[in-house]
């Protein structure tokens, strides 16, 4: 194979520039003596600056995210006396609302503190960082759901044991409940495109809460009375997640965990909103949800972000009232 390295006669500056542009690489040089910072046109574009701007390292540092600024300055200063390659990722603010992730890479000065300048490259790694954050969020949500499913299985076993007398009867009812839970869990997952409206609002509540309603002495302790309206695919997934989370909390330590507990869900359409009241009574000591808990964050993020609404809690003696407010326009799509 022919060598086309930088010293080969077939390699020229234009071809090198073309390769750098294709990779989205921005070149920079920091002249340490006077703090001047030089970048190519790609660098100015990446940082959202005019190519006519006269830069210093301090000037450029002002655009680094405040949470990353000290870390980046320390890293750049350290490269003056660090031998070998270095790399650091950080955020920059190109405007009040535009945050980008930048990766700075270069070569240390091989232990020469008096070196006059340093060179390196900038890469826009925003897409990679967003993907990493998405994977971390998904992993956290999956871990939370697995823990919830284990708690649900334990709670459903406890409920079933209170209303059955033989192991055969208990096995039959528990199997029915776990099967229903499986059907309900399907509603928490995104639906394939093209399946149309997912469900009626009342049916969504009924299907998701069916596994928790006793078949024996305490049958009917879950009551649902909500407006009759269709729910779109996107909203069904989000709302199912909310119902599933609230039911899980209730089974862990709310009304569904107590033999005499009652769960009443009512709703009404008020102008452009649907208001749902989730009321639990009959639980001896309903603990207040921690705002820092993953479940609470998941509920608030889903209701506010995906359903354009709000969720509030009112703890009462032996119960809790959860008020959900969502836009009709966000539910039907």
Image (cartoon, rainbow, N blue to C red):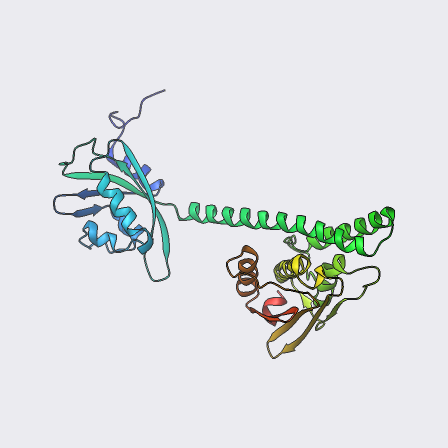
Pick out the residue farthest to the top.
1
Number of marks in picture: 0
Q: In screen coordinates, is 101 left or right of 52?
A: right
Q: Which residue corresponds to the image point at 73% horizontal and 65% vertical from the top-left?
A: 261
Q: Against 311, is 41 above or below?
A: above
Coordinates of residue 87 in the picture (x, y in percent): 32, 39
Pick out the residue farthest to the front.
284
Q: Which residue corresponds to the image point at 70% horizontal and 59% vertical from the top-left?
A: 257
Q: Against 277, is 235 above or below?
A: above
Q: In this orientation, does residue 80 appear?
A: yes
Q: Against 280, is 78 above or below?
A: above
Q: Quadrant of the N terminus?
A: top left
Name the one closer to the observer, 14 or 240.
Answer: 240
Coordinates of residue 20 in the picture (x, y in percent): 31, 39
Coordinates of residue 322 in the picture (x, y in percent): 62, 69
Q: In this orientation, does residue 28 appear?
A: no
Q: Quadrant of the C terminus?
A: bottom right
Pick out the residue farthest to the bottom.
271
Q: Which residue corresponds to the image point at 76% horizontal and 56% vertical from the top-left?
A: 159
Q: In screen coordinates, is 289 left or right of 187?
A: left
Q: Against 11, is 70 above or below?
A: below
Name the one closer to the observer, 65 or 252.
Answer: 252
Q: Which quadrant of the structure image shows residue 281? A: bottom right
Coordinates of residue 92 in the picture (x, y in percent): 32, 53
Q: In screen coordinates, is 73 left or right of 227?
A: left
């Amino acid at each position: 194979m022919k060598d086309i390295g930088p010293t080969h006669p077939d390699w020229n500056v234009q071809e090198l520039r073309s390769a750098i542009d294709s990779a989205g690489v921005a070149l920079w040089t920091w002249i340490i003596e006077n703090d001047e910072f030089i970048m190519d046109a790609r660098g100015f574009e990446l940082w959202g600056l005019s190519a006519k701007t006269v830069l210093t390292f301090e000037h450029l540092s002002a655009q680094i995210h405040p949470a990353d600024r000290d870390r980046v300055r320390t890293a750049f200063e350290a490269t003056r006396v660090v031998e070998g390659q270095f790399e650091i990722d950080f955020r920059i603010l190109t405007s009040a609302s535009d945050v980008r992730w930048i990766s700075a890479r270069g070569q240390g000065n091989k232990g020469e503190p008096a070196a006059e300048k340093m060179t390196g490259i900038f890469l826009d790694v925003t897409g990679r960082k967003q993907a990493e954050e998405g994977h971390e969020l998904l992993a956290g949500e999956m871990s939370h759901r697995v823990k919830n499913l284990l708690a649900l299985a334990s709670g459903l076993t406890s409920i079933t044991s209170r209303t059955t007398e033989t192991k055969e009867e208990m096995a039959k009812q528990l199997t029915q409940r776990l099967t229903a839970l499986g059907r309900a869990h399907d509603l928490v997952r995104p639906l394939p495109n093209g399946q149309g409206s997912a469900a009626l609002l009342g049916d969504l509540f009924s299907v998701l809460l069916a596994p928790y309603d006793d078949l024996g002495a305490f049958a009917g302790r879950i009551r649902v009375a909500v407006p009759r309206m269709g729910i779109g695919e996107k909203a069904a997934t989000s709302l199912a997640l909310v119902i599933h989370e609230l039911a899980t909390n209730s089974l862990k330590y709310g009304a569904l965990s107590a033999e005499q507990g009652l769960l009443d869900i009512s709703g009404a359409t008020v102008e452009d909103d649907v208001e749902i009241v989730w009321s639990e009574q009959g639980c001896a000591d309903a603990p207040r949800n921690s705002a820092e808990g993953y479940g609470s964050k998941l509920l608030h993020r889903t209701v506010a972000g995906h359903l354009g609404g709000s969720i509030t809690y009112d703890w009462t003696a032996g119960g809790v009232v959860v008020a959900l407010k969502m836009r009709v326009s966000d539910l039907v799509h």
